[in-house]
């Protein structure tokens, strides 16, 4: 049940971890960055095919606690290797005439690995980069458990524009804008457009806050809608997030974030948060 929630959760976590860690900035030759994370997601309502917020049949609900690990390695000054993997612990319940059914599953989800390359730099204050990666499932489908993903391979290409402001009232702030395309290798896809924009504001030398808006639009030949959201492949959602970060040393930072899905179609009305430690090696 509710495979779509996992897809939304994956995007939120992957996007948050990368943007808070270093956004589209190159890591640096022979340098490493490691981002362990803990993520929380819950949803009790859905956006139907018309975008209206409704209660799902059976008053179903979904909650996930996910443990993530993002690793980046600087191969050259412009080329980075990135790997991201999640291990969700997810729970759902729904009620029918036969009673209330509870489902739970835990395990590794999809792994995403690829390369990020800084195509152009603007006086080393802003970068335009491209990231190409592959997606592979680390699980097998089990009819008795909640799905951990689509269970098929995929690929993604993403463009990123990242930099800092040096003039006017935004001096000292930084930004990150991303747009991408994801394709799952299945007869029904889906094909997914990814997008996000983030503005970071330093409070002082140790603390910062950032504001993000982003989401995805997924299209498929299968446009049917079911209260069992795991069968839906044609959907869209937009979420907003606030992130707060504290730097302990030049190599260790901690970030906390909260998000809410304020718009969608065939998607969950989800909210939650994440804790992420950024370790620069």
Image (spheres, helix red, strand yellow):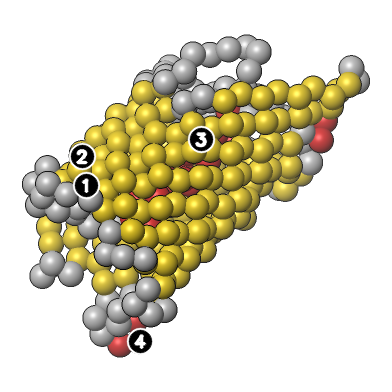
What is the x, y in percent for residue 279?
31, 52
Report crowding for label 3: few under 14, some 14 to 19, many 20 or more residues within 10 A (C-alpha). Answer: some
* Nearer-N-terminus badge (1/4): 1
Whether pointer 1 and pointer 4 mark residues with C-beta atoms closer than 8 Å, the reply is no
Identify the residue shown where x is 48% and y is 63%: 243
In the displayed structure, 238 sits above or below 109; it is below
Label 3, on which residue? 7
Report crowding for label 4: few under 14, some 14 to 19, many 20 or more residues within 10 A (C-alpha). Answer: few
Whether pointer 4 and pointer 3 mark residues with C-beta atoms closer than 8 Å, the reply is no
Distance from disc 1 to disc 2, alpha carbons, whole Å, reads 9 Å
* Nearer-N-terminus badge (2/3): 3
Q: Nearer the viewer, mark 1 or mark 4?
A: 1
In the displayed structure, 30 sits above or below 137; it is below
150 displayed left or right of 97: left
Distance from disc 4 to disc 3, alpha carbons, whole Å, reads 37 Å
Whether pointer 1 and pointer 2 mark residues with C-beta atoms closer than 8 Å, the reply is no
What is the x, y in percent for residue 214?
46, 54
**Which label was assigned to residue 169?**
4
Label 2, on which residue? 81
Q: Secondary structure at mark 4?
A: helix
């Amino acid at each position: 049940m509710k495979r779509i929630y996992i897809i939304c959760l994956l995007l939120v976590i992957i996007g948050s971890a990368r943007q808070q860690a270093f956004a589209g900035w190159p890591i640096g030759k022979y340098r490493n960055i490691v981002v362990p994370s803990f993520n929380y997601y819950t949803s009790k309502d859905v956006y139907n095919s018309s975008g209206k917020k409704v209660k799902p049949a059976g008053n179903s609900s979904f909650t996930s606690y996910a443990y993530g690990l993002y690793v980046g390695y600087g191969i050259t000054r412009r080329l980075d290797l990135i790997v991201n993997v999640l291990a969700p612990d997810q729970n759902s319940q729904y009620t029918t005439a036969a009673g209330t059914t509870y489902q739970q599953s835990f395990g590794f989800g999809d792994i995403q690995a690829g390369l990020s390359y800084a195509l152009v730099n603007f006086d080393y204050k802003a970068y335009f980069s491209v990231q190409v990666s592959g997606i592979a499932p680390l699980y097998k489908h089990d009819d008795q458990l909640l799905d951990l993903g689509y269970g098929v391979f995929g690929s993604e290409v993403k463009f990123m524009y990242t930099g800092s402001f040096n003039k006017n009232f935004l001096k000292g702030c930084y930004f990150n804008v991303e747009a991408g395309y994801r394709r799952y290798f299945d007869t029904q896809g889906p094909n997914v457009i990814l997008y996000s924009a983030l503005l970071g504001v330093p409070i002082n030398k140790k603390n910062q806050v950032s504001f993000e808006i982003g989401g995805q639009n997924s299209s498929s030949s299968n446009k049917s809608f079911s209260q069992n959201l795991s069968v839906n492949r044609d959907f869209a959602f937009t979420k907003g997030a606030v992130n707060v970060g504290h730097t302990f040393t030049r190599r260790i930072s901690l970030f906390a974030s909260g998000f809410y899905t304020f718009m969608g179609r065939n998607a969950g009305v989800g909210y939650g948060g994440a804790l992420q430690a950024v370790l620069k090696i």
